[in-house]
Image (cartoon, rainbow, N blue to C red):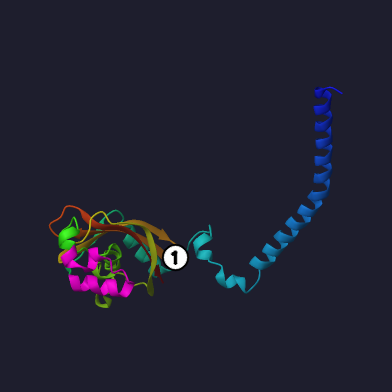
Amino acid sequence: MNVVEFIKEKKQRFQQNNAEFRARIEPQFKSLSELLSKTIFNTLNNPWMSRFNHQDDIDDEPLFLIPEAAQMYKKLESQLGEETFVGEWYRVDQHCINQFAEVTGDQQWIHTDPERAAKESPFKTTIAHGFLTLSLLPKLTDSVDDKNNPYPEAKMAVNYGLNQVRFPYPVKAGSRVRARSQLVGLTPMRKSIELIHEVSIEVENSKRLACVAETVLRLYF
């Protein structure tokens, strides 16, 4: 037997063995697939699981907003792309920075050691934590002021999270900051309206922003 015939024979035997293996294993995979599909179907249709079925987020059915929500949506729709808020200046002093460091456990010297920062930091002073700047958003945007509720028609407003956050420039201890907000996204849902704001935090006497964040808010009616 020459080399060509040897290779040809091995190839035929391999194909035959492979076909036999597939013939044995495919029924088992089919049975497993059917069992898995049946299990998933039964789980998703279990009454207990229906409590976690967020239909308002995934349904493609037409949305029928209640009058209060429809009125609010129309009002907000006219504000898309516009600056909706400019806050007051707020001073971020060393005491504020130290309190945040104590709560979070972030005691890095660039935040909490003014003497060392004056010598070694390129900013020649301590700076606020980036997350401290971010945590000031509710205060800087007046969203926690019950006396000045911008969404009185809603039963509840929920902080749904953030799309993205950047800290382009540090906030030096003793600096004053303020927030500007622009409505950039609006989505009606079955039980709520989702708002996306681009919030920019300015530092007094600086052209660079301390923070730029997209916040996601949901109004429930």
Q: Residue at x 27, y 64 (%)?
A: 129
> Would residue 118 be visible to someone looking at this image?
yes
The quadrant in which residue 51 appears is: bottom right
Q: Look at 26% across and 54% down and name the residue there.
A: 168
Q: How many marks?
A: 1
**Label 1 neighbour load within 10 Å: few <14, some 14-19, many 20+:** some
Rendered-image quadrant of the C terminus: bottom left
Q: Which residues make up the magenta segment?
A: 94-116
Q: Does 64 sit left or right of 178 as displayed?
A: right
Q: Nearer the viewer, residue 8 or 61?
A: 8
Q: Tell which of 124 and 66 is nearer to you.
A: 124
Residue drawn at point x = 46 percent, y = 68 percent = 191
Give the residue furthest to the bottom.
147
Judge left or right: residue 190 versus residue 201.
right
Residue drawn at point x = 25 percent, y = 67 percent: 141
**Residue 131 vs residue 51, the one in the foreground:** 131
Residue 165 highlighted magenta (yes or no): no
Q: Nearer the viewer, residue 4 or 53?
A: 4
- Eyeballing the image, is 208 above or below 64? above
Name the residue type under label 1. Answer: Leu
Q: Is residue 173 visible?
A: no
219 w.r.t. 211: above or below:
below
Q: Position of residue 146 (x, y in %)?
A: 28, 77
Quadrant of residue 103 within the rendered picture: bottom left
Across and down, in percent, residue 114 comes to 17, 67
Residue that extends furthest to the right in the rendered view of this protein = 1
Looking at the rendering, in which quadrant would you find the N terminus? top right
Prevalent SS, magenta region: helix
Reading the image, the residue beneath label 1 is: 65
Percent coordinates x, y for residue 163 in the rendering = 38, 58
Check disc 1 and report its element: helix, strand or loop: loop
